[in-house]
Image (cartoon, rainbow, N blue to C red):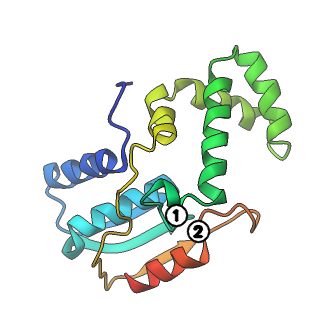
Amino acid sequence: KPAAGYRLVDYAADVLAFVRQEELERFTLAGHSLGALVGLLVAGELPERVEALLLEDPPLPFPRTADDLDDYWRNLGAMTRAYLALKRQPRAAGIETLLTWEPGLWREEVERFADALAETADGVYEAVLTGASRGTVVPPEGLRLDVPALVFQAGDPGPRALRVRGVAQLKAA
């Protein structure tokens, strides 16, 4: 759990290093939420090698400046602060809190959620809170992919990460 290395460009660099190390000529990119943004950055670097895309709920449009923050991104900040505080609580207290925050989950799911939360490096949360990836352009300017793509979103329509302007960005790419 390194203290740093949790910007979008860091994640993309990790994937690009893997693709090059394994000498993958063609590959399918799949990502959920932050992973979908990483997939788009990787596609921007190696568009000729992307065979297909699967993007689940990419949080688009991605803000470039603090002035671009809409309710989704402001809520993400508040939620990130809450999860960071929660992960520092004793496990039993975290589980009980998550059961109230996520009433639709089974206890076993909440226990796994609490464990994953506790095991996640603080740097992941701090990168979100400090806006470490602010200024990153996702999808990359000029990205044009002529590959099969499946983009989908789930959950309540209100807090969905993919908004109308984001759909337009993906269509353009």
Say whether marks 1 and 2 touch (CB < 8 Å).
yes
Q: Nearer the viewer, residue 77 or 112?
A: 77
Quarter occupied by the N terminus: top left
Q: Is residue 42 left or right of residue 119?
A: left
Residue denoted by label 2: 162
Q: CA distance from mark 1 to mark 2?
A: 6 Å
Tell me which residue sits at (14%, 49%) in the image. Answer: 21
Earlier residue among tags 1 and 2: 1
**For residue 140, side relative to residue 33 (left or right):** left
> Residue 58, which numbered label?
1
Q: Residue at x 21, y 71 (%)?
A: 49
**Residue at the image point whose x is 79% and y is 43% from the top:** 105
Quarter holding residue 48 = bottom left
**Quarter of the image that includes the C terminus:** bottom left
Give the vertical position of 30 relative to 121 (above or below). Answer: below
- Amino acid bearing label 1: Pro
Label 2 sits on a secondary structure element that is loop
User: Could you tell whether 74 is left or right of 11 in the image?
Assistant: right
Place of residue 162 in the rendered image (x, y in percent of width and height, measured from the top left): 58, 68
Q: Kindly identify the amino acid type of the residue bearing the numbered disc 2.
A: Leu
